[in-house]
Image (spheres, rainbow, N blue to C red):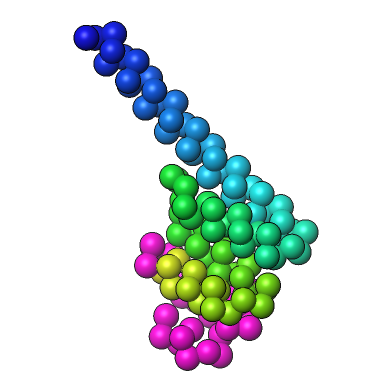
């Protein structure tokens, strides 16, 4: 019985570690695509990051910025709203971030 519990604990540790590495890897791919100005691809990687264990509110924010730069206002606004719902707390950053300039004038942005 102790042996089984040890194996289950080890499996849990390995799974958690792999999940964290996966979100870090996806985040890194998003950052790389963003730096290459491939905003649609960056958005896709950031969205995948939000769906992985270890997602952070900044992943939603980065997805919003990437969608805005890829001229997808609807998705940008949706992910910006999610960023704040999941704890992104920098309203001044969202108000000043040039990445979000294409959506800043919308009524939905003002509601967020």
Q: Is residue 109 above or below residue 44?
A: below
Is residue 94 at least partly visible in the picture? Answer: no
Q: Where is residue 51 in the image (x, y as percent from the top left)?
A: 47, 52
Is 52 positioned to the left or the right of 76 in the image? Answer: left
The residue drawn where x is 56% and y is 85% is 104
Report the front residue among 95 and 16: 16
Let me know if residue 11 is in the magenta part.
Answer: no
Image x and y of residue 94, in percent = 53, 75
Q: Give the range drawn in magenta.
A: 85-112
Report whether residue 102 is seen: yes
Residue 23, compared with residue 15, is above or below; it is: below
Query: In the rendered view of the protein, which quadrant contains the N terminus?
Result: top left
Question: In the rendered image, which quarter contains the C terminus?
Answer: bottom left
Please provide percent x and percent y for residue 88.
43, 65
Q: Please, is residue 71 above or below residue 5 in the view?
A: below
Classify residue 84 by image quadrant. bottom left
Q: Is residue 9 left or right of residue 59?
A: left
Decide which of 110, 97 is in the foreground and name it: 110
Q: In this view, does 89 lie above or below 107?
A: above
Q: Residue at x 33, y 21 (%)?
A: 9
């Amino acid at each position: 019985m102790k042996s089984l519990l040890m194996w289950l604990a080890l499996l849990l540790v390995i799974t958690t570690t792999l999940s964290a590495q996966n979100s870090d890897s996806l985040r890194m791919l998003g950052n790389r695509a963003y730096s290459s100005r491939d905003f649609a691809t960056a958005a896709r990687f950031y969205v995948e990051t939000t769906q992985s264990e270890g997602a952070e509110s900044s992943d939603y924010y980065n997805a919003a910025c990437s969608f805005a730069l890829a001229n997808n206002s609807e998705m940008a606004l949706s992910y910006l709203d999610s960023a704040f719902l999941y704890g992104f707390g920098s309203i001044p950053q969202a108000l000043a971030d040039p990445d979000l300039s294409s959506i800043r004038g919308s009524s939905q942005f003002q509601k967020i």
